[in-house]
Image: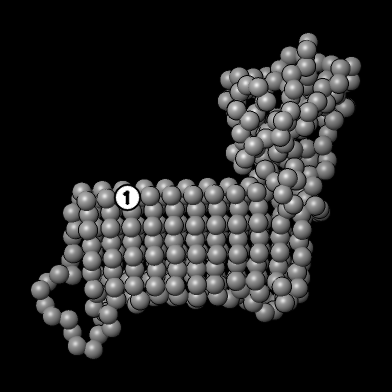
Amino acid sequence: MVALGTGVVRREVFSCAQPVRLDVELGSGGIRARLTEGPELVVEVRPEPGWYGPAGSPRGDAWGWQPEYDWQPGRMPQVPPVPGVPPVPSPYGHGWGAGQGPHGPIPPGHGYVPGFGTVPPGHGYVPGHGLVPTAPGTAPAPGTAPAAEAVAAVGAPTVTGPGLDDIEISFSPEAGLRVALPQGHPLWATALTVDITAPALSRPHLRTGSGFVSVTGTAATAHLRTGAGSLDLQRAEGEAELDTGTGSVSAGRLAGPARLRTGSGSIDVGTVEGEVSAQTGTGQISVGSLAAGSLEAVTTSGEIRVGVRDGVTPDVDAHSGAGGVRDDLSDGSAPRAGTPRVRLRARTGSGRVWITRAV
């Protein structure tokens, strides 16, 4: 690990001048991949800004979970509660209850703090500070905690091991790059950010349980997935799959077959040149230019707006349950001979379908 600026960062640099597969899997946090021309592959892993204090101790937003009950508003009790030790004052709100955290069940007797992770039995948590052993009779280590955050008769040692060295970062020209954390590791629920710089036309396979995924530059193929968060892809020459449970999906140019899906959120595409399917449960779908291939756009509730490139003839099948269809291309004239054809199928349960010429 190295210190860059004020943060703790794991940084690895590999010699790599050719496109490779990029395989990244996080429990929580964001992933950025920049595909550029250059002889190196660079990987940086860090906690998201603000999660680590000046001394390197974990910090979070003080949401948490206790085995038998929810957090009380404005209070942060010990995990488990310690007789005679008052809860830590906290300006934050409710937390997770019923044994269920944001990424699955919390182990019995454990707590959970987003941005930090699982709190083991016999410990509490101080915002901006980290784990607090609940053993009576110990005192805070000198200079490790502001007086306002210290707990009487409870030690508050600085936590200096963020665990970034436990993350697997491996590379070979044949297998490509792999960045992964073992399931169940304390950092699995910690919000991390992975930044990758790799050769253009690499093949990103990027997955996170909760957080954004962004790819700039040109990818040969792209597979991006998150449970909750936005997905952004600048350009894909071949197959692309973008899938999020909730959040927006954005793609600049799709030249090959592609599937875009979100449970709730908007879908925006600059140019379609392949066979593309775009589906959202709730949200609008916007395509700047349908230039070649086909587009299937489906939303339960939301507007669909598609621009068709000049010089192509569209075969349109559009329907709206409530909102109507506006087709600015239906002027009654016969298709021009020799022009390439594109197919458009648009469906919305509630919202307008608007088909026009691309600007």
Foreground residue among 244 and 46: 244
Residue identified by numbered label 1: 300
Image: 28 above or below 86? below
x and y, in percent, of residue 311 in the image: 26, 81
Query: Circle 1: is it few (<14), some (14-19), or many (20+) Cα within 10 Å?
Result: some
Q: Can residue 4 be seen in this view?
A: no
Give the position of the C terminus as an image quadrant: bottom left
x and y, in percent, of residue 199 in the image: 64, 74
Q: Which colour scheme is used?
A: one colour
Q: Which residue is drawn at 88% across and 27% down?
A: 142
Image: 24 above or below 272? above
Res 356 quadrant in image? bottom left
Q: Which amino acid does label 1 sit on?
A: Thr
Which element type, helix, strand or loop, lies under badge 1? strand
Q: Which residue is drawn at 73% across and 40% down?
A: 52
Q: Residue at x 60, y 53 (%)?
A: 208
x and y, in percent, of residue 288 in the image: 34, 66
Image: 85 above or below 196? above
Q: Is residue 185 visible?
A: yes
Q: Is residue 234 left or right of residue 31?
A: left
Residue furthest bottom in the image: 338
Residue furthest top in the image: 84
x and y, in percent, of residue 196 in the image: 66, 63
Q: Is residue 335 left or right of residue 62?
A: left
Foreground residue among 91 and 282: 282
